[in-house]
Image (cartoon, rainbow, N blue to C red):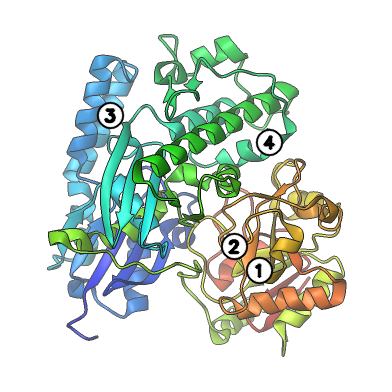
Amino acid sequence: MNRTSKITLGLNYNRKHDSSACIVRDGELLFAVAEERISRIKHDSGFPRLAIQACLDFARVRADELDEVCFGWPTAGPGFRHDLKCLATGGLPLTCTDVLTTTTYFLSMWHQQGGAKVFRQWFGDVKARMRFVGHHLAHAISAYAYSGFDEAAVVVMDGRGAWEATSIWHGKGGKLAHVFTIPFPDSLGLFYSQFTAYLGFLPNSDEWKVMGLAPYGQPKIKLDAFIDTGASPYRVHAKRIFGTGRGPYSDMRSALGPQRVPESEIDDRHKNIAYAVQEACETAMMSVARMAVEKTRCRNLCLAGGVALNSKGNGKIAASVLVDNIFVQPAASDDGVALGAALACYLENGGRLPNKAMRHAYLGPAFDDSAIETTLRTYKLPYTRLDDPAATAAEFLSQGKILGWFQGRMEFGPRALGSRSILADPRDPEMNAKVNNAVKFREWWRPFAPSLKKEAATEFLESAADSPFMILTAQVRPEKRGVIPAVTHIDGSARPQTVEQAINPLYWRLLDEFEKRTGVPVILNTSFNLRGEAIVNTPTDAVRTFFSSGMDALVIGSFLVEK
């Protein structure tokens, strides 16, 4: 390694969810991975030891060669002081349990020195500077520094940072200035996650389910008691979200009826509540985006934070007249703060952030054919070596078969983008049910997304012609909804991934080969995992998941495995 290089490790770790690590050399992002992909623990909140080691291995450096280790959170004090203030003033429920939970968490993170002590326990007493970056600042950097925009309005919306809920920033010329902050618990992410739990799903994990369920509902329920979307930009009534004096969700139960029991039937009331929650979220997101554009006088918009994973809200902003260009950091949730934390040092002493447009998220581990073949032989699996994996996969898909597709470097962020994917024919109106029931084992109402050649996007979509990260929702053109019914949601929307030949030539060629056979340059693409599991990382993960599901074949590297 050239010792004039600056090597920086970025981390997300706060014992809450989505621990991750990335490594940056001289401002260039080399590698990023969430701990869950390696540990196989969904939304793993533990110290990202395995992810860190993967970063070091990829960059071929030792821990004692790192210049900085950057955490995407401040030390424990600011958040604890804010919580005490909220408890004292009634902003948070004042119960023995809440005080104990808050204090225990603070003491744990204080004892761990924000994670620095744990890092040294695993990797030695390194010379690297331990840097603690404001959580929303790390989010904001992760959006602006990878947008390619010289100037941008930057919005961060999540459940909470140390004390923030929503913040606006102004990026210009590689610098990032704070503009405005809404403190926790006036939090759009909190609003959505609490209703996710009320509807019987797992908060900070299953918000996708609420978003997918929403189009089945009707505008029959008012949530004015819980959120004021007419305020500028919004106002969450946190006391009622938490429940005023009669336990968690007591105000929701009083206003909306009993909570849904997990795994129980979905009725019209649940659908209507989901509709109302999503509608309120979209309205609030648009209001924040409008404020950001007005305050910065810039029509380039960058989004990050967990709320920025709400693809329906993102799509409405992108399709509006409010902005000219939009960039949503693909790992917008907390795993992505590692990307921003690793670059924070460039803002020191009046410095400037590197800024390079992120066009793909293929930042994780890769496995060559030798490693894949070793796995196949270890499990004594019959397999065929393929001269043309893309053509073979396209032929299978055109015959209605469901495929596992394992190629190249794993994606960073929650979406499979053609490296760790399950693929199917979008023309079959029954395919959505087939994949949900036999492969993913997940809820019937959850939609699947299309991957399509970028040059064909305007033919099939009304907007989102540039959507490489499957993070913007667009309307499918009415005349095309019957052509690709398996990836068109009940409201006519889709969450597309536009695939560029120069970015992922193998996956683009698969789409091209499928088009040659069917006339449709679109395939159904969902993440290569089973319900409740992390997306597969290794060939072993892929083989195990393949044989645990109803997939027909697995195209893994240059090999084909069939059942």
In the foreground, 320 or 221: 320
Please name the residue that numbered disc 2 is placed on: 466
Label 3 or label 4, whichever lies nearer to me, is 4
* SS class, disc 2: loop
Residue most toward the bottom? Answer: 387
Q: Residue at x 40, y 63 (%)?
A: 146
Which amino acid type corresponds to the residue marked 1 in the rendered image?
Lys
Q: Amino acid at mark 2?
A: Asp
Q: Position of residue 231 (x, y in %)?
A: 44, 23
Q: Which quadrant of the structure image shows residue 210?
A: top right
User: Sequence-wise, which precedes: disc 3 or disc 4?
Assistant: 3
The residue tagged 3 is 102
Task: Give the mark nearer the N terminus: 3 vs 1.
Answer: 3
Mark 4 Cα-neighbour bin, 10 Å: few <14, some 14–19, many ≥20: many
Residue type at numbered disc 3:
Thr
Indicate the secondary structure of the residue bearing disc 1.
helix
Which of the two labelled residues, at mark 4 and mark 1, occupies the earlier sequence position? 4
CB contact under 8 Å: marks 3 and 1? no
Q: Nearer the viewer, mark 3 or mark 1?
A: 1
Specify whether 433 is left or right of 493: right
| Number of the label disc, if any, that sits on residue 213 | 4
Task: Give the mark nearest the N terminus, 2 or 4.
Answer: 4
Numbered disc in front, either 3 or 2 = 2
- CB under 8 Å between discs 2 and 1: yes
- In the rendered view, tell whether residue 363 sits above or below residue 464: below
Q: Residues within 10 Å of mark 2 (few under 14, many from 20)?
A: some
Please report the residue visible at 57 percent of the width from the left and 66 percent of the height from the top: 541
User: Gap in Å between the C-alphas at discs 3 and 4?
Assistant: 33 Å
Q: Quadrant of the N terminus?
A: bottom left
**Label 3 – label 2 distance at C-alpha:** 43 Å
Q: Which residue is mark 1?
A: 454
